[in-house]
Amino acid sequence: MKGLILCVCQGTCPSFQKMNVFEILNHFRREKKVDFVALHPQLCATDGDNFWRALLKNGNDIEKLFVAGCDPVMQKKMFGWTFKELGFDEQKFIGIEIRNMTTEEVIKVIDEAMSVDTQEG
Ligand code: SF4
């Protein structure tokens, strides 16, 4: 299964005000580019770790996990240890920067990340 998760700094940060998160998620649902989508307000908070624990308990079922939010390097630093704890292969994780973008721009960068992934097989 492939999943897309949007993380939006509680929804109050100015960096996420130009986009409609539901329109973005619905786009990828409609296009059937992923098998599931989710919106999380703050994955880097403590309950974000619980979200990963609940989602990745059966991480082997997950083939790719696209996480659109802040800088991917930051994401890796914040989530890496939880992935390790859960034995989730970090190669399956693809972080995507979407801050300060419009709905259309976000759809484009996520689409690009997904097509690079498809090309790489
Ligand atoms: S993980 Fe990144 S996008 Fe999500 S709340 Fe934390 S800083 Fe914001």
Image: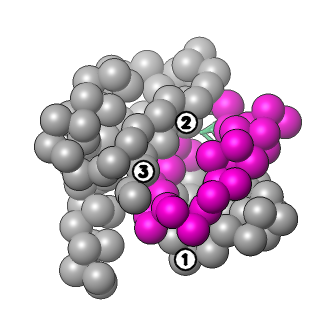
- From the image, state whether disc 2 or disc 3 is nearer to you: 3
Check the picture and name the quadrant holding the N terminus.
bottom left
Magenta includes 57? Answer: yes
Magenta includes 53? Answer: yes
Return the residue at label 2.
7
Between the C-alphas of marks 2 and 3, the distance is 13 Å
> Counting residues from the N terminus, which is met first, the one under dot 2 or under dot 1?
2
Residue 91: assigned label: 1
Q: Is residue 119 left or right of residue 100?
A: left
Give me the residue at 61% from left, 62% from top.
59
Return the residue at label 3.
3
> Counting residues from the N terminus, which is met first, the one under dot 3 or under dot 1?
3
Q: Is mark 3 within 8 Å of ligand 1?
A: no
- From the image, state whether disc 3 or disc 1 is nearer to you: 3
Q: Is mark 2 within 8 Å of ligand 1?
A: yes
Q: Is residue 74 shown to the viewer in this render?
A: no
Q: Quadrant of ligand 1?
A: top right
Question: Which of the pair 67/65 is nearer the observer?
Answer: 65
Give me the residue at 39% from left, 42% from top.
36
Q: Is residue 57 shown to the viewer in this render?
A: yes
Question: Which of the pair 62/107 is nearer the observer?
Answer: 62
How crowded pointer 3 is (Cα within 10 Å; few <14, some 14-19, many 20+) is rated as: some
Between the C-alphas of marks 3 and 1, the distance is 14 Å
Q: Is residue 103 left or right of residue 3?
A: left
Q: Secondary structure at mark 1?
A: helix
